[in-house]
Image: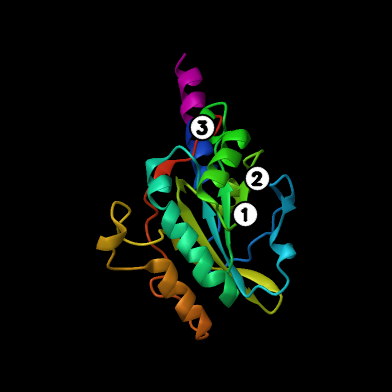
Amino acid sequence: MKRFFSLIIYSLLFGFTLLAQGYKLGDKAMDFRLLNVDGKMVSMADYPDAKGFIVIFTCNHCPYSVAYEDRKIALSKQFEPLGYPVIAINPNDSTLQPKDSYSQMIVRANEKQFPYPYLLDADQSVFKTYGATRTPHVFIINKEEGELIVRYIGAIDNNYEDADEVTEKYVEAAIASLQKGENPDPAFTKAVGCTIKFKK
């Protein structure tokens, strides 16, 4: 019996360790090819003229993600013309959270008229590779000599409750630094949001 419980504890710790792994600042990021709400497959390779990407792991049901929807739309409108498009990815298992199903993603995207792709991480491999743990969780990827390099990880800004009370716009500052050829500072902040729902 003691050995049985030891195995359970080991398995849980091993699982958490795997989820804790992911990209660190300066790592090369992998591209992905995921289903968009318009029925088409989307990857970063579809943006040959992009200078980088604002990849946001987000979802329908999480109140933090909902609170940031208008700000995500604003980021897309501000930075896509400058070469940094927003790509939103829903990492949640919809059997655990039905509001995050593909059909509900389509509904929400239409309601809000998202100007960016809203992709489904159906097998949940992409969020695990990136190391996302929350919704929303941002990874800013910069194109450097043909490689996709992670240059910022964390939150969109420092106040999810009220956009008018934001005093630090982390994503905007990070992009501004990259445009000047500098690394963001801060380059890492704590992502604040709901935990990602995944099958154990």
Q: Which x, y percent locates residue 137?
A: 47, 53
Say what amino acid the circle numbered 2 marks.
Val
Numbered tag placed on residue 75 in the rendering: none
Q: Nearer the viewer, residue 49 or 187?
A: 49
At x 50%, y 86%, the residue is 180
Q: Which residues are magenta?
A: 1-11
Q: How packed is label 3: few (under 14 Cα within 10 Å), some, or many (20 or more)?
A: some
Q: Earlier in the sequence, mark 1 or mark 2?
A: 2
Q: Is residue 9 magenta?
A: yes
From the viewer's perspective, is 47 left or right of 170?
A: right
Toward the top, the furthest residue is 1
Q: Quadrant of residue 189?
A: bottom left
**Location of residue 123 with respect to 85 vertically, above or below:** above
Q: Is residue 183 visible from the viewing direction of this image?
A: no
Callout 2: few (<14), some (14-19), or many (20+) C-alpha neighbours within 10 Å?
A: many
Q: The disc labelled 1 sits on which kind of residue?
A: Pro
Residue at position x 45%, y 18% in the image: 2
Calculate the distance from the C-alpha at mark 1 to the C-alpha at mark 2.
7 Å
Residue 46 visible in the snapshot: yes
Spot the residue most to the bottom: 180
Give the image location of residue 84, x and y in percent: 57, 70
Q: Secondary structure at mark 2?
A: loop
> Of callouts 2 and 3, which one flags the residue occurring earlier in the amino acid sequence?
2
Q: Residues within 10 Å of mark 1 (few under 14, many from 20)?
A: many
Q: Which residue is mark 2?
A: 37
Q: Which kind of residue does numbered mark 3 sit on?
A: Lys
Reading the image, the residue beneath label 1 is 117
Overall secondary structure of the magenta section: helix
Q: Position of residue 104 (x, y in %)?
A: 57, 35
| Most distant residue in the left direction | 165
The residue nearer to you, when weighing 55 against 104, is 104
